[in-house]
Image (spheres, rainbow, N blue to C red):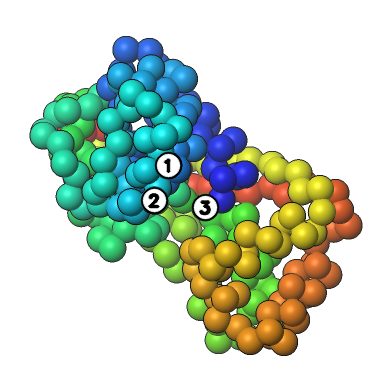
Amino acid sequence: MGRYSVPLAPQLADFAEIAAGRRVLDVGCGPGALTAELVRRVGAAGVSAVDPSEPFVTAARERHPGVDVRRATAEQLPYGDDSFDAALAQLVVHFMPDPVAGLRELARVTRRHGVVAACVWDHAGGQGPLSLFWEAARELDPDVGDESLLAGARQGHLAQLFAEAGLHDVEESTLSVSVEHPSFEEWWEPFTLGVGPAGDHAAGLDATSRDRLRERCRELLPLPPFVLTARAWAARGLVS
C-alpha cells in the first residue's frame, strides 16, 4: 500500500487541518507514510505514533528519529487523556478488532475540541487500489471473501462509526490518489508477498489457480504503463 498511502497522507493531514504547533498521534502508523507527513508539518517532537506490529514499529523508529513510536493497538493507547491536539488513523479502522472502541480511544487521548480523523479505501464501491484484484478473484471463485464488508469501507459507514464513538460535528469526505505503474509485473508483485487479505488470498491458492488469477488481472488492466486512481472514504470529528 505504500505507493498509494504516501500520496494519500497529505490529503488526510489537510482534512484534519494539521499545522505547525500541533501535537499529533498517528495510530496504526505502519512503516510511517503518514508519520512522515506529520513530521514535515509539525516536527518530530510534535508527533507520536503507534502500531501493533513490532517490525513496523522498528521501521518507523529508524525512518523517523525523534518521533515517539510505540507498540500498541488502537483500542489500548499508551497515553493519558487529552495528550494530543489531533489523532489520525490512515487505512487502519477497517483492521481494528473493535472500530468503535478504537475510535473512542483516539478521542480519549485527544483534547477537548481536538480533531480525530481517519480514512479507509472504498472497497465496497470498487474504487480501492485492490478492487481490480478482488474483481478478478470473484470471477474465478464467486464465494471468495473480499474487503467490501470491512468497517468504514462503504459510503457513510466511517461517519457512522465516528458518531457511535461519541465524536461530534462529524464530516465525511472522499480522498483520491492516482499512481502510475510502469509494468504489470510491478503492479502484481506485492500480491505475492502474502501481506493483507489480498496477499493471504493469493498465497492460499495453488500454483495453477494463482496463475489464472494473475492472468485475469492482466486482462482487466490497461496496457502498461497505466495509471490507477483509488478513492478513500474519510471522516473527521471533534472531541466533546
- Point out the tag, 3 or 2, that comes first from the N-terminus: 2
Residue at position x 30%, y 36% in the image: 69
Kind of residue at badge 1: Ala
CB under 8 Å between callouts 3 and 1? no
Mark on residue 121?
3
Q: Quadrant of residue 214?
A: bottom right
Q: Nearer the viewer, residue 149 or 48?
A: 48
Mark on residue 84?
none
Judging from the image, what secondary structure is the residue with disc 2 in?
Answer: helix
Q: CA distance from mark 1 to mark 2?
A: 6 Å
Q: Nearer the viewer, mark 3 or mark 1?
A: 1
Q: Which residue is mark 2?
A: 55
Q: CA distance from mark 3 to mark 1?
A: 23 Å
Q: Nearer the viewer, mark 3 or mark 2?
A: 2
Residue at position x 54%, y 43% in the image: 5
Kind of residue at badge 2: Pro
Q: CA distance from mark 3 to mark 2?
A: 23 Å
> Could you say where residue 218 lies in the image, as x and y percent from the top left?
80, 67
Q: Does residue 193 lie above or below 178 as drawn?
A: below
Q: Please tell me how many numbered marks the rendered image carries.
A: 3
> Could you say where residue 33 lies in the image, as x and y percent from the top left?
49, 37
Residue at position x 24%, y 48% in the image: 72
Mark on residue 59?
1
Judging from the image, what secondary structure is the residue with disc 3 in?
Answer: strand
Which quadrant is the C terminus positioned in? top left
> Could you say where residue 37 lies in the image, as x and y percent from the top left?
48, 27
